[in-house]
Image: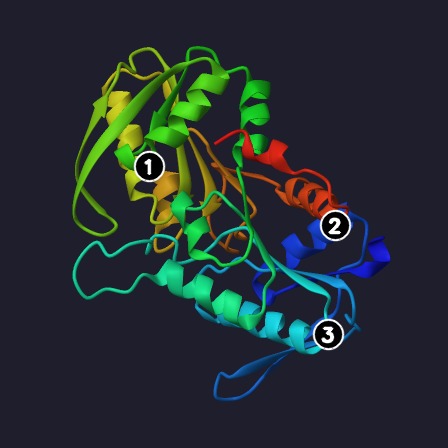
Amino acid sequence: MNDMVKILAGSASQYLGETIARDFGVELGKVIIQRFSDGEFQPSIEETVRGKDVVIIQSTFPPSDNLMELLLLIDAAKRASAKRIVAVIPYFGLARQDRKDKPRVAIGAKLAANLLTAAGVHRVITMDLHAEQIQGFFEVPVDHLYASTIFIPYLKSLNIPDLLIAAPDTGGTKRANAYSKLLGCDLAICYKQRKVANQVESMTVIGDVRDKNVVIVDDMCDTAGTLCKAADVMLAGGAKSVRALCTHPVLSGEAYERIDRSSLLEVFVTDSIPLKDGRPKDKIKVLPVSGLFSGVLHNLIENKSISSNFIIS
């Protein structure tokens, strides 16, 4: 059945595409990106995909070219008579724009969903959406996977004594609570206030962190300001150590340097977004997601259940 599946990857997720294809048992399909001097680009699929299930892997982190490249690859596969097109988007960009939180703003996540549907995608597979309701923005099936299926076994293997799970803000309480239940440990919540985006004005901790080894759980790490401030607050409250667990390492601005200088012991992330070259990574531990996505793709192609991947949320 593998000969009826073609796995392709956009330029932003080449390494991830190669590992997923290898774990799936096929070679990554050949794609060429022609770039013009004015910045325009045109992806070209260099192998036949007629009548095949085409899987296109691309995380849509900035710049917006990554989303546009994914849309063009979907359109190319559709016009090349692919039987079915599955977009694997480990990190779904614009997910923070899931509602109108003030007048006269766009709902970027809904717009991105509309664009993907209009391009011709038949199914979307993603992981740890910033807001789970984004699944409802699509008019095609969405398989929303959880990185906890990777992180939970890893945390158990570390055998951290006096473990406590913490949410970096009230919005992450549900996710952190699920981790604490599965690991059989207590929960703490950080309450933060912002004046502007990406800048935390004040933070307090709800819960007792004294003499605990804390693991902060979040879906993404952007500037790392919240994580580093939370680590300081936890240690000031008597915690023995603080680690962080973030699915998507967006790590913009001075995030790498901020983590390196922080009181965080370790930061666990996935390879949904590649780490930037030439930046300090001593405290960052990357866990691969290729096994999770290749396993789901196998079951999807063979029309088997994938519900076991949705239990941990």
The tag earlier along the polypeptide, 3 or 2, is 3
Which quarter of the picture shows residue 308? top right
State the residue in front, 179 or 14. 179
Which residue ends up furthest to the front in the rendered image?
Answer: 139
Residue that carries the numbered disc 3 in the rendered image: 81
1 or 2: tag closer to the N-terminus: 1
Residue 76: x and y in percent read 65, 76
Q: Residue at x 48, y 88 (%)?
A: 38
Helix, strand or loop for disc 3? loop
Amino acid identity at mark 1: Leu
Q: Please tell me whether mark 1 sits on a helix, a strand or a loop.
A: helix
Residue picked out by circle 1: 227
Q: Which mark is residue 301?
A: 2
Query: Is 63 above or below relative to 125?
Result: below
Work out which residue is located at the far bottom of the displayed protein and give it.
Answer: 37
**77 with respect to 302 (left or right):** left
Expressed as whole percent of the image width and height from the top left, the position of residue 151 reads 54, 30
**Could you say which is closer to the camera, residue 8 or residue 214?**
8
Q: Could you tell whether 142 is left or right of 18 in the image?
A: left
Say how the picture is coloured. rainbow
Total label count? 3
Which quadrant of the view contains residue 224?
A: top left
Can residue 264 be seen in the rendering of this structure? no
Tell me whether the residue at label 1 lies in contact with that at label 3, contact meaning CB atoms closer than 8 angstroms. no
Q: Amino acid at mark 2?
A: Ile
Does residue 113 lie above or below 193 as drawn? below
Q: Which residue is rendered at x = 67% and y = 56% of the image?
A: 17
